[in-house]
């Protein structure tokens, strides 16, 4: 089971790394989570340099893909050559995007007929791409999910875990990372956000 977190130059650390940390709470022999990037190294919006663990081709072949956000997402979607390398298929992959990552899924035509969540800055760009934006942190339809707001990465991670390893695994992963004294609140909130989208 390979989950790729698509991460471009100018990435938001909270999106990519919170999801990476939560997803890696699953300890199964075939479970692998990796940062996938178009280059060997990417620099975050705050100057953190990170080495890629997987290529864009690896991401296209992964069982699940999360598309993180960043300050250069509009440059990404304006790069036809780069976009042409992103060949995702929701009939065989779980796809999720956060904040401006939602714009990438929109430009790839993967949100046709699907309302989305994103951050307030990205909202008008996603709407211009013809995708209605909801005022909520998480939504999913079938195998495609989107989330809005940096800390909504926990919902994307929990949704992926629930879909791939079961709801008990998702509950355990969120419980592990939640603040002491607030664990029940965090787990309840996370499951309340994702549970309506796990049925059917």
Image: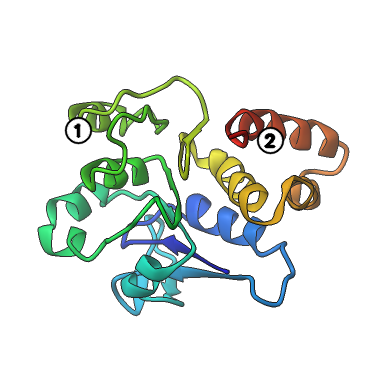
x 37%, y 55%: residue: 45
Q: Position of residue 159 (x, y in %)?
A: 60, 44
Label 2, label 1: how far apart the Cα atoms are: 29 Å
Which quadrant of the figure contains the C terminus?
A: top right
* Residue found at the far top of this picture: 135
| Whether residue 90 is situated above or below residue 112 in the rendered picture | below
Q: Position of residue 151 (x, y in %)?
A: 56, 40
Side (left or right) of 183 relative to 69? right
- Crowd rating for badge 2 (residues with CA inside 10 Å; few <14, some 14–19, many 20+): many
Side (left or right) of 54 relative to 112? right
Q: Position of residue 184 (x, y in %)?
A: 84, 34
Q: What residue does disc 1 label?
A: 129
Q: What residue does disc 2 label?
A: 190
Label 2 residue SS: helix
Which residue is more in the foreground, 187 or 31? 31
x 58%, y 61%: residue: 20
| Whether residue 58 is situated above or below residue 85 in the rendered picture | below
Which quadrant of the figure contains the N terminus?
A: bottom right
* Residue found at the far right of this picture: 181
| Whether residue 99 is situated above or below residue 67 in the rendered picture | above
Q: Are marks 2 and 1 in contact (CB under 8 Å)?
A: no
Tag count in the figure?
Answer: 2
Label 1 residue SS: loop
Which residue is more in the foreground, 100 or 191? 191
x 59%, y 50%: residue: 160
């Amino acid at each position: 089971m390979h989950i790729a977190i698509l991460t471009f130059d100018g990435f938001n650390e909270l999106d990519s790394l919170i999801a990476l940390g939560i997803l890696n709470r699953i300890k199964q022999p075939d479970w692998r989570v990796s940062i996938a990037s178009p280059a060997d190294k990417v620099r975050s919006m705050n100057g953190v340099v990170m080495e890629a663990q997987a290529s864009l081709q690896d991401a296209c072949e992964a069982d699940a893909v999360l598309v993180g956000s960043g300050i250069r997402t509009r440059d990404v979607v304006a790069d036809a050559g780069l976009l042409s390398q992103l060949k995702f298929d929701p009939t065989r992959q779980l796809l999720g995007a956060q904040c401006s990552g939602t714009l990438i899924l929109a430009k790839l035509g993967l949100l046709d007929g699907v309302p989305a969540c994103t951050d307030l800055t990205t909202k008008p760009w996603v709407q211009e791409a013809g995708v209605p934006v909801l005022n909520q942190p998480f939504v999913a339809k079938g195998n495609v999910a989107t989330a809005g707001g940096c800390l909504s990465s926990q919902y994307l991670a929990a949704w992926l875990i629930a879909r791939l390893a079961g709801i008990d695994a998702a509950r355990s992963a969120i419980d592990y990372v939640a603040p002491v004294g607030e664990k029940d609140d965090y787990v309840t909130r996370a499951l309340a956000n994702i549970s309506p989208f796990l049925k059917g």
